Image: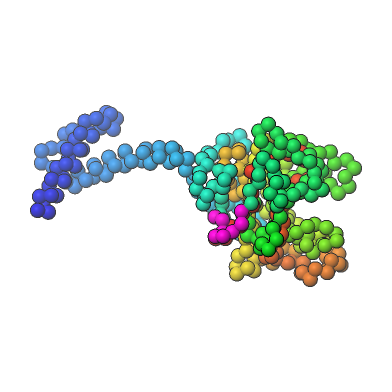
Amino acid sequence: MDEMSDKIQSFSILKSIILIHQILPQDLGMDRKIIPSTINWNHMYFHILVLILIFQIPVTIESLARNDQDFPIYKSAGASSGTADSNGIPGTPSPAIDTRLSSPSSSSSSDRTTNDIFGIKKMYPTKSGGREWLINMNDPRSDGIFFITSDQNITQQADGSWRINNTNVRLNVDTPLNTQPWKNVEITGYARIVDKVPIDGNTEAATDDFDLNWLARGGRHSTDTPCEGSALTAILDINGMVGWKKEIWFPGGYTDELGKEDKVIGSILDRWIGFKAIMYNTNNNTAVKMESYIDNRDTNYWVQVTDVLDDGDWYAKAPDSEFNSADCGRPKNYVMTNGGSIVTFRSDNIVWDFKDLSVREIQPP
C-alpha cells in the first residue's frame, strides 16, 4: 500500500512538473526532452527543488513588501565609554541618518503590544501592570498629570499639534499620589522645530544651546531642593547631534556628554522628527542602560542612534568643593538607579510644535 501511494504521489508530482514546464517562459523553461517516459527520480526531485526556489523567492519578497516588514536593526553592546552604535552589525560604526532618503513606514496597529494608541511603534513592551501616560491632544492639561513649568502658553495648530515659544520650555509628566515614580521608561515624542529663539540677553544660554531633551529619574529642579533635581537626559540638537548627560544634583552635578555623535544629515528645522529616550536598570540594579532612537522622516521607522551604559565610570565635572556643597550624600560617579517623580520634555531656545507625547513603564530585556 505504501509503495502504491508513493507511486501515485510521484505521478502527481510529475504531472505538475509537466504542466508548470508548459507554461514557463522560454528564458526559464527547460528542454522538454529531459522528461522521458522512464523517469530518473533523483533528477525529478532536483528539478522540483529548483522550481520551488524559482517561484517561492519572489512570493516571499512580495509578501514582505506588502506587509511593510522592516529589516532588523542590530543593537551593539553598551559600554561605559558610551559610544557603541547600533544601526549596523554589532561592533561597527553606524552611519548617519540621511534625510534625503525615505524610510519604510510601519502601519499602525490596534495591537497595543506593538504600537501605542497613536500608532507609534514600541521599542520595548509595557511592563505588566505598568503605568502608561499619553498626551490628550485635544487638551493636554486636562488630565491633571501634564503641566508646563511657569504655566507657559501653548497654541493648537491647524494639524492638531501644539506650539510653544519660549527660551526655556519644560513639559512635565508627574506621578500621581500613592504611585511608584517613573524609573524604567520609554519616552516618546514628535517635534517640529519652527525657529530659534534669540538668546541675546540670556546669560544662561550657550551659543550652540538649541536642542530638545527628554529626561527622567528626578523631580523638580530648584536651588531650594538641589538633590531632587537629578536626571538622565537624552539630547537632540538642531544640527542632528545626539548624546546623553547625567545630572546628579541641580545645578552643580552635571557630567560631560556621552555618546555624542552627528547622527542626522542636514538640519532638522521645519519638519517633523520622532525622538525616543529609553532607560532601564541592568546588572542587578547596579548599572543603567540608556538608548535613544530617531524616526527621521515621521514614518514610524525608528533607528537607534545611541547606546550608553553607566556602570560607575561617568563622573560629575564640577570641582569636589562645588559638587559636595549640595550635601546630597552621592559620589561624583553616582549611578542613577533610582526612580524619579517627573518625566520632562525640555527645549532650550527654540520655537517648536509637539504631538503624540507618551511615557511608559517598560519591561527591561
Residue projecting furthest to the bottom: 329
Q: Is residue 212 left or right of residue 102?
A: right
* Residue that appears at 68% across and 54% down: 259
Camera sees residue 300: yes
* Residue at 47 percent of width and 43 percent of height: 69
257 in magenta: no
Q: Is residue 309 left or right of residue 245?
A: left
**Identity of the residue furthest to the right in this view:** 201
Q: Residue at x 75, y 46 (%)?
A: 347
Residue span colored magenta = 125-132
Quadrant of image for the C terminus = bottom right
Q: Residue at x 9, y 53 (%)?
A: 1
- Residue 286 percent across, percent down from the top left: 64, 69
Q: Residue 130 magenta-drawn? A: yes
Q: Return the residue nearer the eye: 99 or 162.
A: 162
Magenta stretch: dominant SS? loop
Residue 52 shown left or right of residue 5 in the figure: right
Name the spot of residue 245 as percent of width and height, x first: 73, 56
Vertical position of residue 334 compared to residue 105: above or below: below
Q: Would residue 263 be visible to someone looking at this image?
A: no
> As rendered, which of 148 and 264 lies closer to the eye?
148
Q: Residue furthest top?
A: 26
Residue 79, position as x, y percentages in the image: 63, 60
Residue 175 sits in quarter: bottom right
